[in-house]
Image: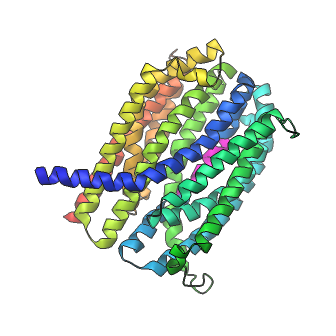
Amino acid sequence: MKFLRSETVHESKLLLKLAGPIIVGQLGQNLIQLADTLMVGHLGPVALGASAFASSVFIVFLIFGLGMLAPITAMFAHAQGQEDHPRGGVLLGHSLIVALGIGVIITAILLGLLPHLHIFGQRPEVLAEGSAFYKVITWSIVPSLIYQAYKQFTDGLGRTKVAMYVMLGGVLINVAGNYLLINGYHGFPKLGLVGAAWASLGARVLMMIAMIGYVHLHPQFKKHLTLPWIHSYDQQILKNIIRLGIPNGFTFFFEVGAFASCAVMMGWFGAIPLAAHQIALSLASTSFMVTLGIGIASSIRVGFELGRGDYKLARHAGFTAIILGGSYMSLCGLGFLVFRHWFPTFYVNDPDVIAWAAQFFVVVALFEIFDGVQAVAIGALRGMSDTQWPSVIAFFAYWIMGLPGGYLLAFHLGVGPIGIWIGLLIGLIFASILLTYRFHRLSKRFIA
């Protein structure tokens, strides 16, 4: 028992060492959206609701692309565990092909959807402002995915601080851009909500350029980039990335799509509940970034140990990460419950918006626990190259149980807007239980 505890402590330290920079980077990614929300808040509930609506549609497609690239981290870690350095560069080249291809496709879909945003049933004033924001932010898909491909490469090699520093720089650029373009300071045009979209686009383009430059110019990556990409093209590698990436993309799509659909349904209640929903979701998403970082670290650790052939340690790493994620989110849930009336004041001073957000935080406090467990379990499964079953579980949990449950509660059983959040809670409960059980069964089979 003492040995097991010491192993768990050691594994926890390894996970946190990997996860620390990833968490900062993930928080930075979310801080770009959080900065938009905070700095748009003073424009009023309509602008905040429009930002929530446009971001909800945009983020579903972006997350699908990010999900397609996510399994590559474990592939990099597996190659690192085998000490096959040139393979890392080969995988990077193929992941860039996928990033560029899926990025162009998603951009075309989003632009094609632009004239039809009215189908989501939003109020005219929300739709008008949201469409303008959406049109600009759509062009950030390709740079975001190319940046992500390089991030998967550096993270998978254990160089997690690289993306962290680039992301922090992107946050600073985004905040400065928001300040100048939303308000029109220092001779810049006063663009309001659209200014936030231009600031985010500029930040993501510069982040992409920074990652490309760093990886190709820094000496520490030379041993991984020894083979010319054109001569090392392998159709089987590309097929393997797509085979793992598509179901993982749908896993992300089903979860984030459920949250985005909830934002659309919340808009049917009006701009004030929608603005409150955006506040609650913004803070919950920020706390989730820490857990997502732990999940990525679990993917790296599980993939690395599988590359070394140590299946028992791979299982131990996965479960240690799941416990860490659930424990952290439990503390976050408690914080949201205690400070539910205070947190919304960071965004707005409208008493109606604050009152609705405080109600939503009561539910958020509980589902934080389950959200943490399911996020890390997905990462551990991804480290085992298991992406198909998680996508099935995500579809069942969110689209069969969560969304229909929330819709019934909100619109047919008289619960109102908070019923939508209860539906999300139901989906997360099912997802966390089924994904953890899947990792238990699969990892046990490896060591049997």
Q: In the rendered view, does 58 fall on the left or right side of 373?
A: right
Q: Is residue 323 above or below residue 368?
A: below
64 falls in the magenta region: yes
- Measuring 45% from the left and 67% from the top, which residue is drawn there? 157
Q: Residue at x 28, y 50 (%)?
A: 320
Residue 349 percent across, percent down from the top left: 65, 17
Point out the stretch of residues depicted in magenta: 57-67
Q: Viewer-proximal residue, 385 or 178? A: 178
For this orientation, the residue located farthest to the bottom is: 231
Residue drawn at (39%, 26%) of the image: 334
Judge whether 352 appears above or below 136 on screen. above
Left or right of 207 on screen, residue 309: left
Quadrant location of residue 312? bottom left
Q: Nearer the viewer, residue 57 or 350?
A: 350
Residue positioned 47% across, 63% down in the render = 159
Position in image of residue 132 (x %, y %): 80, 39
Q: Toward the viewer: 47 or 185? A: 185
Viewer can see residue 242: yes
When asked about the image quadrant of residue 66, the answer is bottom right
Q: Is residue 441 visible?
A: no
